Amino acid sequence: MCLFCKIAAGEIPSKKAYEDESVYAFYDIAPQAPVHVLVIPKTHIESAQALTREDDALLGHMFEVARTLASENGLDKTGYRLITNVGADAGQSVPHLHLHLIGGKTLKWDN
Ligand code: 5GP
Ligand code: ZN
């Protein structure tokens, strides 16, 4: 099992933000902003590049969870960023699909 599969299964501890049958969300261990939550599917999907139409409902649900967590953290008023890195050039370090929900400050855009 990959790192995020183990986190979703509770085999590696994490600070949970949300959980249901298909999605798990937890606070990033190295936050880039005051709010930094990772939203992951419980099933192993390597990245956005590995998604198929079969995952449409799951992906829609991941976004639903992300916007609910954004609202709970007050970010719906101030704005936030949803990021998913794919592969080496993007710096994807864990090969399990994840949405970064980042906010709570004015964010810069480096690239
Ligand atoms: P990526 O670089 O793949 O887009 O994002 C991976 C993220 O996972 C990074 O922001 C990193 O800080 C976070 N991360 C890596 N290992 C762990 C861990 O064991 N626990 C938690 N909570 N976050 C982790
Ligand atoms: Zn995995």
Image (cartoon, rainbow, N blue to C red):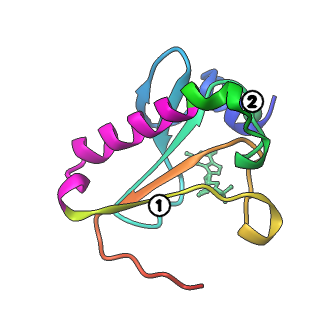
Disc 2 under 8 Å from ligand 2? The reply is: yes
**Residue where numbered disc 2 is placed:** 44
Magenta span dominant secondary structure? helix
**Drawn side of residue 6 relative to residue 103, left or right:** right
The amino acid on which the numbered mark 1 sits, given as a three-letter code, is Pro
Disc 1 under 8 Å from ligand 1? The reply is: yes
**Drawn side of residue 65 relative to residue 14, left or right:** left
Question: Of the numbered discs in the image, which one, if any, rests on residue 31?
Answer: 1
Residue 93 in which image quadrant: bottom right
Q: Earlier in the sequence, mark 2 or mark 1?
A: 1
The amino acid on which the numbered mark 2 sits, given as a three-letter code, is His
**Drawn side of residue 83 relative to residue 19, left or right:** right
Residue closest to the far bottom: 110
Query: Can you give x and y, in whole percent of width and height, for residue 16 in the image?
Result: 44, 32
Is residue 57 among what the camera can see? yes
**Magenta residue check for 75:** yes
